[in-house]
């Protein structure tokens, strides 16, 4: 199997070290991958959209997850310096560290939120954006996933709701789970992580053939995902509500492709549609059979979109 030609841990301050690795052609077109989650980490599967003879691809694990340190699966690790602003700064610090002038940004799900935030703050450093399963992590989107999707999966949602204390069931479920995930009792934390991840796996399962994410069988991954997702969702991505849509006009001159599944009901298509209306150089492509993620033809469309920007550096 191919290996990265360079890798390391970048000290980004706040006691945080971000793991990164570079693949492909060191003289090729630079690209950076922003993984989802937050907290899912960035494995070699993310190389599939690229031509490693032509592209210089940078993968990295966002703060607190994957091979970055310290790891938030440890309940003693604070999340105080883990925000969207910190992650945007990490991406830019990594770009400078690697000597990249501009790069293509590929992001999915949470990575699309982070990609938009990064591009809006550093548009001159982005040659193009390819985003799929597009979300902007607004309060309305979080409400949709944690309450409204219960109309599609009522039994599963009832189990999710009942994972918190009775007094919290009619309130902010994300904050209630976040509190459980910080409980001093490890059994309470573990049950909350299981319940949270079970619902996470359910609300994306809106297309035929959906299979549970095998990573949720790993207690470290499960705890990392639950802690970071609840942390970001309870703060609506640490962004003023609607900021990414309002800022989309500022991406004029930065080309982008937004890829989204028509059956991605947990992340409704109106989010990328509105972005495409506000972003002059974006093109929205809908995949009729696809849901949330890379299945049902999404992977091939992502590869085509990345290849379509071959001349952008």
Image: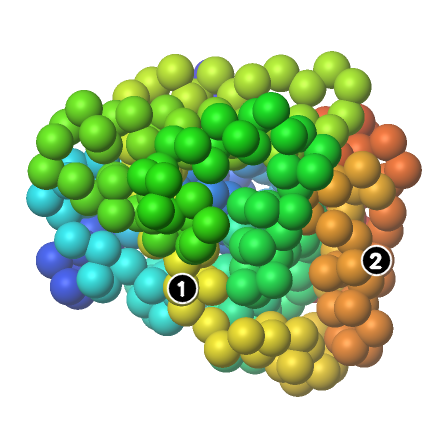
Residue at the image position 66 percent from the left and 60 percent from the top: 129
Q: Which residue is drawn at 33% across and 31% down?
A: 193
Read off the residue under disc 1: 235
Q: What is the C-alpha distance between the residues marked 1 and 2?
A: 28 Å
Of residue 153 and residue 290, the one placed in the foreground of this image is 153
Q: Mark 2 points at which residue?
A: 284
**Coordinates of residue 9 in the picture (x, y in percent):** 22, 47
- Measured along the vertical axis of the image, is residue 140 above or below residue 1? below
Query: Residue at left 65%, top 47%?
Result: 148
Q: How crowded is mark 2: few (under 14 residues within 10 Å), some or many (20 or more)?
A: some
User: Between residues 155 and 126, which one lies in front from this camera angle?
Assistant: 155
Residue 62: x, y in percent? 35, 49
The part of the image, by quadrant, that contains residue 278 is bottom right
Question: Which image quadrant: the C terminus?
Answer: bottom right
Q: Which of 199 and 273 is in front in this view?
A: 199
Determine the residue positioned at 63% across, 38% down. Answer: 150
């Amino acid at each position: 199997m191919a290996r990265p030609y360079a890798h390391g841990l970048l000290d980004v301050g706040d006691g945080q070290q971000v793991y990164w690795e570079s693949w492909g052609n060191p003289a090729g077109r630079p690209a950076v991958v922003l993984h989802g989650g937050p907290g899912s980490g960035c494995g070699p599967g993310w190389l599939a959209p690229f031509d490693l003879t032509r592209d210089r691809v940078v993968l990295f694990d966002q703060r607190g997850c994957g091979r970055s340190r310290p790891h938030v699966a440890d309940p003693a690790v604070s999340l105080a310096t883990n925000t969207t602003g910190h992650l945007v700064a990490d991406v830019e610090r990594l770009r400078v560290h690697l000597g990249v002038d501009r790069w293509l940004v590929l992001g999915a799900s949470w990575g699309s939120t982070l990609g938009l935030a990064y591009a809006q703050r550093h548009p001159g450093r982005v040659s193009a954006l390819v985003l799929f399963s597009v979300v902007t992590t607004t309060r309305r989107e979080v409400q949709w996933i944690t309450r409204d999707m219960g109309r599609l999966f009522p039994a599963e949602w009832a189990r999710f709701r009942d994972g918190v204390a009775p007094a919290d069931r009619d309130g902010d479920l994300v904050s209630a789970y976040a509190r459980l995930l910080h409980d001093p009792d490890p059994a309470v934390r573990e049950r909350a992580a299981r319940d949270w991840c079970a619902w996470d796996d359910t609300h994306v399962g809106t297309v035929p053939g959906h299979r549970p994410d095998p990573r949720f069988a790993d207690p470290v991954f499960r705890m990392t995902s639950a802690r970071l997702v609840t942390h970001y969702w309870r703060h609506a991505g640490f962004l003023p509500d609607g900021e990414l849509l309002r800022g989309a006009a500022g991406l004029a001159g930065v080309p982008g492709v937004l890829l989204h599944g028509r059956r991605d009901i947990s992340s409704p298509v109106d989010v990328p549609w509105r972005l495409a209306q506000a972003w002059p150089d974006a093109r929205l492509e809908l995949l009729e059979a696809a849901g949330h993620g890379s299945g049902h033809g999404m992977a091939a469309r992502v590869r085509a979109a990345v290849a379509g920007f071959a001349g952008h550096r």
